[in-house]
Amino acid sequence: MINRFIIKRLQDEISQPQIDIILGPRQVGKTTLLKVLEKYCLQQGYNTGFFDLEQPDVLAEFNTSDKLVIDKIKSAGQVVFIDEFQYIANASKIFKAIVDSPQKVKIVGSGSSSLEIHKHLKESLAGRRFLFQIYPLQYSEIKAAANDYPFDDYLCYGGMPALTHTDQKPRQQQILMELLSSYILKDIKSLVREENIKAFNHLLYLLAEHQGSTISVHSLASQVNMSSKAVNHYLDILEETYVNFRVYSFSGNLGNELRKSTKTYLYDLGVRNAVLKDFSPVSERTDKGILLESFVFLKLKASLLPNMEIRFWRTKEGDEVDFVLMINRKPVPIEVKSRINSGEIPRGLRKFLSRYKAKTAFIVNETVTEETMLDDCRIRFITFEDFEKLAW
């Protein structure tokens, strides 16, 4: 069992009254987390109940009146775990009745699609629930369990938990292809019209191929032979099912900055490589820079707090910074380089710092670890593995 860094935070929430909702894409380890939390609760002396609503016989028990569902949950234990709770009709009404009742029952649920989640968790649950987004395993989580796990293998196969059960590369590749098929069949088929599945698959491929580059919705629409409105709708679906994330440009409204540009990143490196059908060694790949940049993005995405957001910066002249992490509206520029010389500060980062005040900047790279100053900004050269260990 690989120890997930988020588990301690979830354990601390058990004594709090609100509903905890664990969100994330399919097969990212949500069910396992619920079971680990249930074991913890039993050790703490709580009575627990567990319902996996992807099991037809269990779901059938919830296909009844709201009152009977409420009674069933309340009688199951002091802490009740509901896996894939979005299958419950009137979930928000039912949860509100339970939370507001004198008999206090802690509910911990999981879900795979925020399209469904937001439909179920309406305004009536405002202030009564906390959302926790779960991502694939971080490299440092895997390495803590298997100290000799190669970094290049993570760049190639990513962090989906199912891969940790085997070290056979062909089997890992098959698992990733199955995960991809499961997403298309289970989540997307209900959200995309049958005749558009082929176009959707083509769009997914284009996003993987151009990951980390600025995208044009108009160009994507032309390539998949659909309208820009339809492509934007599909991008929304990908984001709402936690599969692909958009990053928008940072701008101080200066004339030469690209203010409406967008980059996108898939939620896992292995899934991206599965979409491209390319599992060749990192040393042989022309997209190594994109893999490294994506690694940094996924670390940042998993670290986001309510006072943070991820941007990137680019000018019409081609100067750029890969990421600008906004913390309390203050920028922390982050440049990603495979190789860099000691003391070398990329031109784009210099340009950014000449325009915007920043106390700290990062140059994430493979070998150099040092610090230097540029005017009033501390620039930290840091390796990819050390960057992933940062706590913001």
Image (cartoon, rainbow, N blue to C red):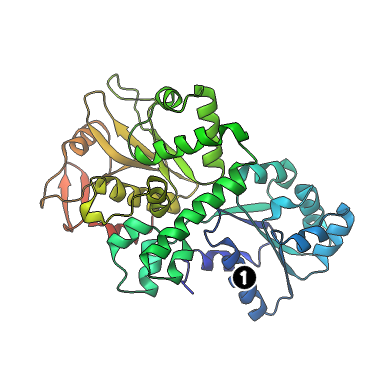
Q: Position of residue 28 (x, y in %)?
A: 52, 58
Q: Look at the image and tell me in which quarter the C terminus lies.
A: bottom left
* Residue corresponding to mark 1: 35
127 and 70: which is toward the camera: 70
Q: Kindly identify the residue that appears in the image at 37 percent across and 45 percent down.
A: 276
248 and 251: which is toward the camera: 248
Q: Kindly identify the residue that appears in the image at 15 percent across and 43 percent down.
A: 345
21 and 372: which is toward the camera: 21
| Left or right: where 69 falls relative to 113 | right
| Left or right: where 137 falls relative to 93 | left
Total count of labels: 1
| Residue that protrudes farthest toward the top in the picture | 255
- Can residue 103 be seen from the camera position used here? no
Q: Position of residue 374 (x, y in %)?
A: 16, 43
- Which of the 4 quarters of the picture holds residue 351? top left
Q: Position of residue 19 (x, y in %)?
A: 68, 57
> Which amino acid type is shown beneath numbered disc 1?
Lys
Q: Kindly identify the residue that appears in the image at 67 percent across and 78 percent down.
A: 42
| Left or right: where 368 falls relative to 109 | left
Q: Position of residue 256 (x, y in %)?
A: 27, 21
Q: Residues within 10 Å of mark 1 (few under 14, many from 20)?
A: some
- Which of the 4 quarters of the picture holds residue 104? bottom right
Q: Is residue 195 above or below residue 379?
A: above
Q: Is residue 303 above or below residue 171?
A: above
306 and 297: which is toward the camera: 297
- Can residue 313 be seen from the camera position used here? yes
Mark 1 lies on a secondary structure that is helix
Q: Is residue 62 above or below residue 249?
A: below
- Which of the 4 quarters of the picture holds residue 355? top left
